[in-house]
Amino acid sequence: MTSQNQTPAETPLPEGENQPLGERVTNRSQPPRSAAFKEFIGSQWAPRSEQLPARAEVAEAAARRRAAISAKFPGERLVIPAGPLKVRSNDVDYRFRPHSAFAHLTGLGVDHEPDAVLVMEPLAEPAADGSGHEATLYFRPLAGRDTDQFYSDPRYGEFWVGPQPTLEEIHAEYGIATADLSELEVAVTKNAGNRALGGVQVRLVREVDLNVDALVDTSRYNTGVDLEQADTQDAALTEALSELRLIKDEVEVANLRRAIAATVTGFENIIRALPAAKAHRRGERVVETAFFSAARTEGNDVGYETIAACGNNATVLHWIRNDGTVRDGELMLVDAGVEDDTLYTADITRTFPVDGTYTPVQKRIYDAVLTASEAAFAAAKPGNRFRDVHAAAMRSLAESLDSWGLLPVSVEEAVSDEGGQHRRWMPHGTSHHLGLDVHDCAQAKRELYIDGIIEEGMVFTIEPGLYFKEDDLAVPEEYRGIGVRLEDDVLITADGAQNLTAALPRTTEEIEAWMAELAG
Ligand code: GLY
Ligand code: MN
Ligand code: MN
């Protein structure tokens, strides 16, 4: 990696032992600081294109999302940060990924925009489109070539991270008013306060950007707003933004379909990589990188760390170490999802035999999981409760376990509130909402999520599994060291669950044929 120098160009060169501690991190490089250098580096660049980008397809949908949240909080200032760059270690950052609520309300995707903040300012009179708020996006726009930032700022400078969008470009593309980040403080704090005293109530999505947390907190202290009440009100905004995503709009469904198609490609790449995986002492890493390679080469990322687990590792629910071997005769569980540049992610699991053929006991366990999945699919329809999907899968699994003589109680006792013995082999939930976050809508109220009614437009996973650890003495030896999960992503329509991930095979016969074809 290129050596960075974070010392502003006007800072005098540090000298020997008098150099302050904080500046010593910049010891390793010394850019020229002369006036001649500054003048020369700022000159002789081709003019920038003045052509503005076309309006993004997502702009109208994002405006509708903002109007929906506006209607819930009339007369209040809403502050939704994108979040800052996050330090990985020392002076190295992770790739930027905006907070999901910010991405949802703006339509901005990958890379956009570190430190940005969306402020929805209440209007005295509703706007022409009926919205009670005017949205403004505050961000750090492209710096001029005559600035130090142009060449010396490793986090934001064009020499280091490439050209950033201008205020005009983001405005043209997303249809949101834009302003320089330097204007944020006034925008957030002006006239902030107790509404009863004529001030503007401010609500914030907290813990996304600590600088903005401090800004809003400061304005409340200064205006005497009850801080406990502010806690509750801020939590209600976060909750409402999470609930706003429970029903996906058309743009979101299209984004999910794209992410899923890319994920299917990634799974196909895994099957082709199996010979290499078997030959390597860390074959699971070969599987993981086969998926990642398919994602990255298409310009995408993964929505969560890939689980590539062979044999007994598949019984570890979040096995992301992925450093085991890949062996003929064993099952390979892969749980992976591409996040495309709109930031929507797939979440798919397939469990397949490394050598292409399930053994009888592997097939028996797989078929029990498949049957549970089918029961869950049947329950995933409008009018049922979200929890019914899980209940259907659990009853089915309990029945299979009982038929194998593994349950110490009856099926009815196991699925009762006092039972749960079958959960020894399936301790996780069967479904979660899916979208911008792999576990989407996580701050929604219980009565709208787990106790909520299933509605058209919801997208969630169906992912039953059975996990028999190699040291589990409650199961026959032939079951030990086998983990199976089958995870699909479904869109709820009037007719029930549409399987968005149907391009990947589900039955053992289909999977064997798919593997044979890809291997051939
Ligand atoms: N990969 C995380 C999950 O399936 O929920
Ligand atoms: Mn999942
Ligand atoms: Mn998953």
Image: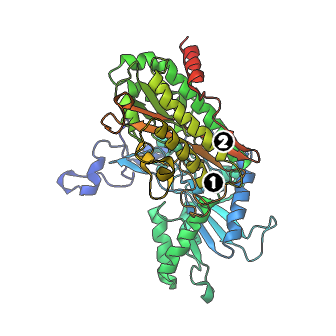
Tell me the quarter of the picture where residue 477 sits. Answer: top left
Residue furthest bottom in the image: 197
Residue farthest along the top direction in this orientation? 520
Disc 2 element: helix
Q: In front here: 244 or 62?
A: 244
Quarter of the image containing the N terminus? top left
Up-down: is 402 above or below 68?
above
- The quadrant in which the C terminus is found is top right
Whole-percent x, y for residue 87 in the image:
39, 50
- Residue 71's place in the image compared with 106, above or below, is below
Q: Is mark 2 within 8 Å of ligand 2?
A: no
Tell me where residue 89 appears, x and y as whole percent.
34, 47
On screen, residue 69 above or below 480: below
Q: Which residue is mark 1?
A: 104
Q: Position of residue 174 (x, y in %)?
A: 69, 51
Marks 2 and 1, how far apart at CA: 12 Å
Q: Which is more N-terminal, label 1 or label 2?
A: 1
- Left or right of 46: which side holds 319? left
Q: Position of residue 149 (x, y in %)?
A: 47, 50
Q: Residues within 10 Å of mark 1 (few under 14, many from 20)?
A: many
Any part of residue 472 in sight: yes
**Residue at which label 2 appears:** 255
- Number of marks in the rendered image: 2
Nearer the observer, 293 or 4: 293
Q: Is residue 414 above or below residue 119?
A: above
Residue 53 located left or right of residue 23: right
Say what amino acid the circle numbered 2 marks: Asn
Label 2 environment density (alpha carbons within 10 Å; few <14, some 14–19, many ≥20): many
Residue at left offset 24%, top offset 56%: 21
